[in-house]
Image: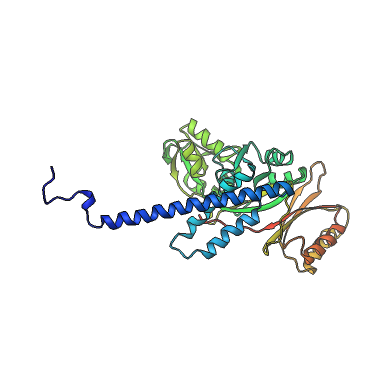
Amino acid sequence: MASSGSRTPADAPGEPELDALRRRIDAVDASLLEAMNERARLVQQIGRLKRGSGAPVYEPQRERAIVERLLRANPGPFPATGLAPVFREIISATRSLEEPVRVAYLGPEGTFSHLAARRTFGSLTRLEPVPSIADVFGAVERGRAELGVVPVENTSEGIVTAAYDAFAEHEVGIGGEILMPVTQHLLSRSGRLDRVRRVASHPQPLAQCRGWLDRHLPGVERIETPSTAAAARLAADDEAVAAIGSAIAGESCGLRTVEAAIQDRGDNTTRFVLISREPSSPPSGRDLTSVLFTLRRDEPGALYRLLEPFARCQVNLSSIQLRPMKDKPWEYLFFLDAEGHQSEPRMAQALAEAARVALSHRVLGSFARSRPEAR
């Protein structure tokens, strides 16, 4: 029995005030639940209208605008860094009421493509792993997925050639982009550097961490794998193997971190694009247009005359990449990224004049530029 001088928890100082605050939080939570269900009902109505008109379920520009508007309007103290993930999941959940969106990505689970897809579409989207980048394109082209997420460029290692080559072979376009900071971890069963005899990963992460590996694991064999997740599984089966990959890949395979953040550049970022059979997107005011050209090999000045209209029309070219054409030695595909939307007069004029010079051309899409996500 408690003595007359003792206090029970209910009698502790401040307890009545704490209980009152908790009751207010409960009331706010109930209001949030009511508001989310009201949002869900409105989305269901939108879904019925979209099905009637054939409009796409996923509209990246609209979803991005929602989050950006909320970030601008947020007075605090709710942290801005937490606002985007919260609303991404709310949007994902209510979008699933319209129609499930299938998104293909380079699998298996735990790859950076998986992480980019999950961060973009939320956990209630049907994320479908496929074995290769070419398979992502094939899944979208054949209608097994509405969208695909593929890496196309990294700040350390440049372009992902498999993605550019696939654009030439598949009738799909670009409907958006994702800029995702990439942190590479060295992962193994033991978590000890002195036990590492081989290092495994996809060729891109191996290259992104080349300097660190040269300094800390000189002479250690490097094994290329189809994905970072495949490397993690290899490390899980062999204690002498360490994998380079994401923290989530290590967690899913029961690996320990040998060393965190071993990428050579602190600003290491990968650019992903969203591929679609219908990549049209309305102007946003900060758009990028991607175009694929081929030129006549034996025509002097053809490349100059292809690029000149963009300069004359004051359209900035932010990127020019070339890839060899299959079965045509010393002939190339030219990929151009131009700042602006294809519907804008200056861009439309530049594209039309360049097309007259080119042997062939295809506009891959105009889409809103992405902003890098916070680490």
Residue located at (48% from left, 55% from top) = 82
Residue 20 falls in image quadrant: bottom left
In depth, the one of 233 and 203 nearer the eye is 233
Look at the picture and state if 226 lies above or below 339.
Answer: above
In depth, the one of 199 and 243 nearer the eye is 243
Residue located at (65% from left, 59% from top) = 369
Look at the picture and state if 365 lies above or below 247.
Answer: below
- Which quadrant, please, contains the N terminus? top left
Residue 269: x %, y % from top left:
57, 53
Residue 156: x %, y % from top left:
59, 53
Residue 308: x %, y % from top left:
81, 65
Q: Is residue 102 left or right of residue 327?
A: left
Residue located at (45% from left, 60% from top) = 78
Q: Is residue 220 left or right of residue 179?
A: left
Residue 86: x %, y % from top left:
50, 52
In depth, the one of 199 and 359 nearer the eye is 359
Q: In this view, does 59 lie to the left or right of 71?
A: right
Looking at this view, name the residue that lies furthest to the left.
4
